[in-house]
Amino acid sequence: MARRHIHLARAMALAVLAGGLGACGGVNNRESLQYVDEPVTMLYNRGVDLLDRNRYQEALAAFEEVERQHPYSSWARRAILMEAYAQYRSGQYDASVENAQRFIALHPGNESAPYAYYLIAICHFERIADVGRDQGTTELALASLNDVVRRFPESAYARDARLKIDMVYDQLAGKEMSVGRFYLERDQHLAAINRFRNVVEGEHLQTTSHVPEALHRLVEAYLSVGMIEQAQRMAAILGHNFPGSEWYERSYRLMTDANVAPVAEEEAERRGWLGRTFGTVF
């Protein structure tokens, strides 16, 4: 997945948590931050400055010191999320989620709670695997993103989460296509059909970029098992919705080679094949 949203996450984090604070000088290593009592603003500003310079581990140490030295201050509350953000930027996603969840547990009604939920979601989103692997993380990212939208529907976090949700559904559709092609290549046509149907019929998947290929693969699978009318129906739906696509051209050639006549759009409409949604294939 592209990481263009990192800049948005950073802007949100600093806008919510830094509160317009200035920056102080940095430090050379994590150890030098430990066990030195310092004013809380100095520690916190140091962490922000280190974040600005992409020195995430040192920034994390500074924010941890805010908590250690000033545990009952409002700065300590802010530091928890800044720790989570520093961990997110350095790829420590589990630790970031843990700190964001800790913030929510300690301060559920805080004005920065929406960002904590959002940070959890993008940590899961960053770890979405390619379509050839298990999609458990994808499901977790989807649930977390939907949680942000449900809890904070008018927020900037929700707007960004909705964009990512579309990307997640495309990922899930891609996984169905990958499995379907696997079955199709091994002549397990009914198993393949079920996978392609999931893409064509799925409430959220039928608007993804994979639908044209899924319709073509259904044409291919139905022709292979002699289900001619179903193949004609899928070809008609494909031609109606994606008339200039490569997949429609391939389906047309496939049917021509199989001596199967395509059904004209008017006839497909008369048969009720061309509704507002793809509907069921049987």
Image (cartoon, rainbow, N blue to C red):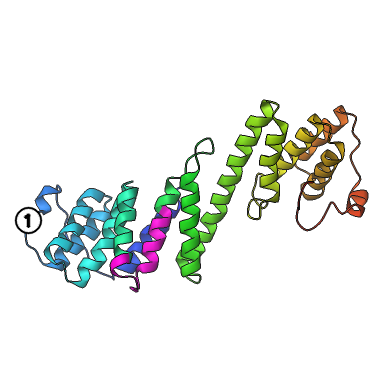
Compared to 58, does 153 lie above or below? below
- 111, above or below 229, in the image: below
Determine whether the residue tagged by mark 1 lies in a helix, strand or loop. loop
Q: Position of residue 134 (x, y in %)?
A: 49, 39
79 left or right of 5? Answer: left
Image quadrant assignment for residue 166: bottom right
Image vertical order of residue 113 relative to residue 181, above or below: below
- Along the horizontal axis of the image, is 22 left or right of 253? left
Q: Residue 84, percent across and down?
A: 30, 56
Answer whether residue 115 is magenta in the image.
yes
Residue 234 x, y percent position in the rendering: 80, 43
Q: How many numbered marks appear? A: 1
Q: Is residue 228 above or below residue 267?
A: above
Q: Position of residue 191 (x, y in %)?
A: 68, 35
Residue at the image point whose x is 54% and y is 50% from the top: 168
Q: 82 or 232, which is in the foreground?
A: 232
Q: Is residue 21 toward the left or the right of residue 176 in the image?
A: left
11 vs 211, left or right, is: left
Query: What amino acid is found at the position of numbered circle 1 in the picture?
Result: Tyr
Query: Which residue is more in the foreground, 88 or 258?
Result: 258
Region rendered in magenta:
105-122
